[in-house]
């Protein structure tokens, strides 16, 4: 370095060295080192383009590429020393390169700013995370399909307001989550399309006068295109917010599932038994077996939502273009990636070890007038207007509550007091099996519909036979 006064890569105009407190406050290397492989990948592509456009000689390019490869190996071997006085991953690597290969290394940053460099690294990282999350989502979706197949035909109460509402197939309930996580997968892959646009070449924010070829870099790095406005590019973190919002939705879906598992594993419900290896005991109450995994997943949704909020507030009121505030984008995103991916993985593992207590589930459909809607529908089919039918069944239910019995306990004569259109075929309608089987509307819980849904999912997820996962 020519400059003797400040050792920073940007130190030319600075007189003294930076205060230690400032270095400690401004550094990001403690966490953005996670981006090292993307930084190196981006630099290699950038150097290749610089050489193709006459800004680097062949020898310089070779020196840079070899130097970067060696740096990557030493980071992976754990022998690289990250220095907080070099602020971030970009300058740690660039300085190491200059130290290793000399002047060629000092040419690497031509036509580039850390502003477009960090945007590039972050996009490359998140692009990979989108693919990783899509795979994790497929794993958990497979687990639901396997459960749906295993418990095909078993009945449980469906709830609204957490009150027994209508009987459904256990498999239908499982397939509801299959759908939810399917939307999450679509969402994250859609988000990937907007992530996969090259920001490099925006330079600081106005573009560059040096002869570069952004399309070439995009092609080398597998981007679908290049961003259109350098000012937008330099200060844009929409893609990170969008990604975090996709993960938040995933975490919230996991949280809803967790809540159900916590309820279902309680003695009050006793619908499921979570494998011992996924539970812990109490240090004081010997009888306890606690559903810690779903509780923690539910609890962790707080930090994921919090991270999303951090990012949203981060960009509020930021003037164009890059502002150092944007360095605060990484920790919430990294934490979200770690939290949501770990939650997805452990939940999928737990689901694979989940047992349903189908007797208790079925038993719970026997009380609570769960087929009352079916009786109303029966009346509708006998030409009673639905609102009248609703009133008739309501009065019948009230009478049962009074008599402390279920609708099925009424005799035909008693039934007919409520409506003369009722005949003895009503008892089939009042059975939970009849109720489930009648719901043949598209997306309904009838056995035929659920069988179709599960079969389709098995084909889509390459599941063969009973829960065996074939090659995709
Ligand atoms: N560490 C910085 C960040 O994460 C990199 C960009 C810094 N650019 C700058 N001109 N200070 O945002």
Image (cartoon, rainbow, N blue to C red):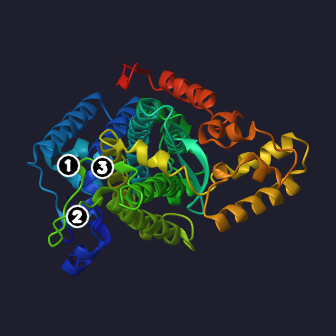
Q: Characterize the local packing of mark 3: few (<14), some (14-19) or many (20 or more) Cα atoms within 10 angstroms.
A: many
Q: Nearer the viewer, residue 61 or 80?
A: 80
Q: Quadrant of residue 225?
A: top right
Q: Nearer the viewer, residue 275 or 218?
A: 275
Picture coordinates of residue 296 (x, y %)?
Answer: 32, 62
Q: Residue 191: in sight, yes or no? A: no
Q: Residue at x 16, y 66 (%)?
A: 286
Q: Quadrant of residue 351?
A: top left
* Circle 3 residue: 274
Residue 288: image tag: 2
Label 2 vs label 1: CA separation?
14 Å
Label 3 vs label 2: CA separation?
13 Å
Q: Residue at x 63, y 30 (%)?
A: 449
391, above or below 18, in the image: above
Label 1 vs label 3: CA separation?
8 Å
Q: Of marks 2 and 1, which one's residue comes earlier in the chain? A: 1
Give the secondary structure at mark 2: loop
Q: For the residue with label 3, is its CB less than 8 Å from the closest atom of ligand 1?
A: no
Give the secondary structure at mark 1: helix
Q: Residue 162: in sight, yes or no? A: yes
Picture coordinates of residue 13 (x, y %)?
Answer: 32, 71
Residue 277: image tag: 1
Q: Can you say which quadrant of the picture contains the N terminus?
A: bottom left
Picture coordinates of residue 215 (x, y %)?
Answer: 52, 34
Q: Quadrant of residue 25?
A: bottom left
Q: Of marks 3 and 2, which one's residue comes earlier in the chain? A: 3
């Amino acid at each position: 370095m020519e400059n003797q006064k400040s050792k920073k890569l940007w130190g030319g105009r600075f007189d003294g060295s930076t205060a230690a407190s400032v270095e400690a406050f401004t550094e990001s290397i403690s966490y953005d080192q996670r981006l090292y492989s993307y930084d190196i990948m981006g630099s290699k592509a950038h150097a290749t383009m610089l050489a193709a456009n006459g800004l680097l000689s062949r020898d310089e390019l070779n020196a840079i590429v070899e130097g970067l490869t060696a740096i990557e190996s030493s980071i992976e071997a754990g022998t690289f020393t990250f220095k907080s006085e070099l602020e971030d991953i970009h300058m740690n690597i660039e300085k190491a390169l200059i130290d290793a290969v000399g002047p060629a290394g000092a040419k690497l940053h031509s036509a580039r700013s850390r502003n477009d460099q960090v945007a590039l690294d972050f996009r490359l990282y998140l692009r990979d995370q989108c693919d990783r999350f899509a795979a994790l989502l497929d794993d958990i979706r497979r687990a639901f399909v396997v459960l749906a197949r295993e418990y095909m035909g078993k009945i449980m109460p469906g709830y609204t307001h957490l009150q027994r509402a209508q009987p459904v197939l256990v498999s239908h309930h499982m397939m509801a989550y299959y759908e939810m996580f399917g939307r999450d997968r679509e969402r994250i892959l859609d988000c990937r399309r907007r992530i996969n646009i090259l920001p490099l070449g925006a330079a600081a924010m106005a573009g560059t006068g040096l002869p570069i070829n952004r399309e070439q870099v995009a092609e080398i790095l597998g981007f679908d295109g290049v961003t259109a406005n350098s000012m937008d590019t330099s200060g844009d973190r929409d893609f990170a917010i969008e990604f975090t919002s996709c993960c938040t939705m995933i975490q919230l879906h996991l949280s809803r599932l967790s809540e159900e598992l916590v309820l279902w594993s309680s003695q009050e419900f006793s619908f499921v038994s979570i494998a011992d290896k996924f539970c812990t005991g109490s240090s004081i109450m010997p009888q306890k077996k606690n559903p810690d995994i779903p509780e923690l997943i539910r609890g962790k949704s707080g930090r994921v939502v919090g991270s999303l909020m951090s990012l949203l507030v981060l960009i509020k009121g930021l003037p164009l273009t890059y502002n150092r505030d944007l360095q605060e984008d990484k920790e919430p995103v990294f934490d979200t990636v770690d939290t949501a991916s770990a939650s997805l993985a452990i939940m999928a593992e737990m689901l694979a070890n989940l047992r349903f207590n189908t007797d208790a589930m079925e038993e719970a459909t026997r009380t609570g007038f769960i087929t009352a809607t079916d009786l109303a529908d029966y009346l509708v089919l006998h030409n009673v207007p639905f609102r009248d039918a609703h009133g008739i069944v309501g009065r019948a239910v009230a009478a049962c509550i009074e008599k402390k019995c279920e609708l099925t306990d009424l005799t035909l004569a008693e039934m007919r007091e409520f409506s003369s259109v009722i005949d003895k075929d009503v008892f089939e309608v009042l059975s939970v099996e009849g109720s489930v089987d009648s719901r043949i509307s598209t997306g309904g819980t009838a056995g035929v519909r659920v069988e179709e849904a599960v079969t389709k999912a098995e084909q889509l997820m390459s599941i063969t036979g009973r829960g065996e996962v074939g090659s995709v």
